[in-house]
Image (cartoon, grey):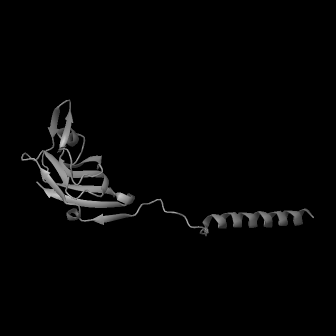
Amino acid sequence: MQIAVGVVLLVVLGLGGYFLIGSKSSPKPEIEESSELVVQKLEAKEIGLTLEATPDKKKIKFTIDKAQDIKSIEYELVYEADSTAQEKSEGGEATVQRGITGSADIKSGETSYTSEDLDLGSCSKNVCRYDTGVSSVAITLKITKAGNKIYEVTDSLEL
């Protein structure tokens, strides 16, 4: 009798475990919304994007000439520069990648946008230490247009 109860208990536990594991790994029939947004690519010319360096090549700014249906902009400017003496002494490479990020809201009715000058270096208390060895910069813009559609635009500038 005890053997029969043990076998039944073992079968019940085995089936329960099988269904429990099977239900976790089987696809769910309901439709799940993706948490990722669909980002469409735009060409720089489609929004009139231009990059410009100051004559001393220590600052960059970007302009968007076709901003009439743009609500907001997020940007990331990336470039390679010579490593500082401290970075090299700590075992760093000869060059290091640096970046600048920011965002801006475009006011309703504005047809263009120009960023502030973006320093290729670091500034603190009105003292700037500009990076050396910068030969090009690349920018990626995440643009939100009317209707909350999101677009990505990339461009670069040789210095």
Residue drawn at point x = 7 percent, y = 45 percent: 56
Q: Is residue 155 visible?
A: yes
Q: 70 or 117: which is nearer to us?
A: 70
Is 129 on the left-hand or right-hand side of 39? left
Q: Against 32, is 52 above or below?
A: above
As drawn, which residue projects farthest toward the front? 109
Quadrant location of residue 145? bottom left
As drawn, which residue projects farthest toward the left? 55
> How many badges with numbers are in the image?
0
Q: 6 or 81: which is nearer to us?
A: 81
Q: Is residue 94 visible?
A: no
Q: Against 15, is 58 above or below?
A: above
Quadrant location of residue 111? bottom left
Quadrant, the N terminus: bottom right
Residue 63 x, y percent position in the rendering: 19, 53
As drawn, which residue projects farthest toward the top? 125
Q: 53 or 67: which is nearer to us?
A: 67
Residue 152 x, y percent position in the rendering: 30, 60
Residue 8 x, y percent position in the rendering: 84, 66
Quadrant, the C terminus: bottom left
As drawn, which residue projects farthest toward the right? 1
Q: Against 1, is 84 above or below?
A: above
Q: 15 or 100: which is nearer to us?
A: 100
Is 130 on the left-hand or right-hand side of 24? left
Residue 123 x, y percent position in the rendering: 20, 36
Residue drawn at point x = 56 percent, y = 67 percent: 31
